Image: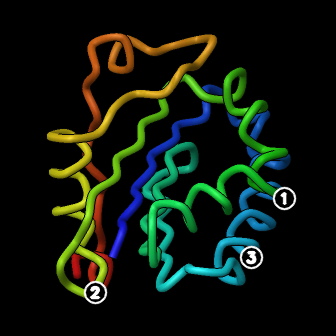
Amino acid sequence: MFVSVTRLRLRSIRYLPQFSWMALRSNLQARRAPGNLKSRYLNHSPLVFWTLSGWESEGAMRNFMTSGAHRRAMPKLLNWCDEASIGHWHEDSSELPDWKEAHRRMVAEGRTSKVHHPSADHQAKRIPGPKLRGKERN
């Protein structure tokens, strides 16, 4: 399974309504996308959002990423976010890793994405881990 993890931090709450609408549409698109095996989402603060998805192939993930609602959202994130990072890897298991492992892999193998207003953490390539509650720890 090809795994993709993303982390976005909005730089202002004023972007939250538009971001939420676009994230909802992108999430629906991902769940219906050919080759999507599993998808999970995590909001660990009002401005920080994680996605974790498993795909049949890297090509299936890229087809999703470069089409529909997701493609329309990506350019806006350059201005809306002050932190953005992404990681990809192949997983032998058919199960998605837990959030702790996804964060570990992102730090070890991922990269930051371009944003127009980077935070100090983004500039230093520091990727804070998700704050997990109860059932999210699994």
Q: Earlier in the sequence, mark 2 or mark 1?
A: 1
Q: Is residue 10 left or right of residue 92?
A: right
Q: Residue at x 50, y 77 (%)?
A: 39
Badge 2: residue crowd in 10 Å (few <14, some 14–19, many ≥20):
few
Q: Determine which residue is flagged by label 1.
A: 68
Badge 1: residue crowd in 10 Å (few <14, some 14–19, many ≥20):
some
Label 3: state its secondary structure. helix
Can you give x and y, in whole percent of width and height, for residue 59 in the image? Answer: 54, 61
Q: Residue at x 46, y 65 (%)?
A: 42
Q: Amino acid at mark 1?
A: Gly
Q: Is residue 12 left or right of residue 107?
A: right
Q: Measured along the vertical axis of the image, is residue 105 above or below residue 101?
A: above
Q: Closer to the camera, 99 or 47?
A: 99
Residue 100's disc is none
Q: Determine which residue is flagged by label 2.
A: 95
Marks 3/2: CA–CA distance: 20 Å
- Where residue 125 sits, quadrant-wise, is top left
Label 1: state its secondary structure. helix
Q: Earlier in the sequence, mark 3 or mark 2?
A: 3
Q: Measured along the vertical axis of the image, is residue 89 above or below residue 127?
A: below
Q: Residue at x 34, y 47 (%)?
A: 87
Badge 3: residue crowd in 10 Å (few <14, some 14–19, many ≥20):
few
Q: Earlier in the sequence, mark 1 or mark 3?
A: 3
Q: Determine which residue is flagged by label 3.
A: 28
Q: Residue at x 22, y 82 (%)?
A: 138
Q: Is residue 135 left or right of residue 52?
A: left
Q: Amino acid at mark 3?
A: Leu
Label 2: state its secondary structure. loop
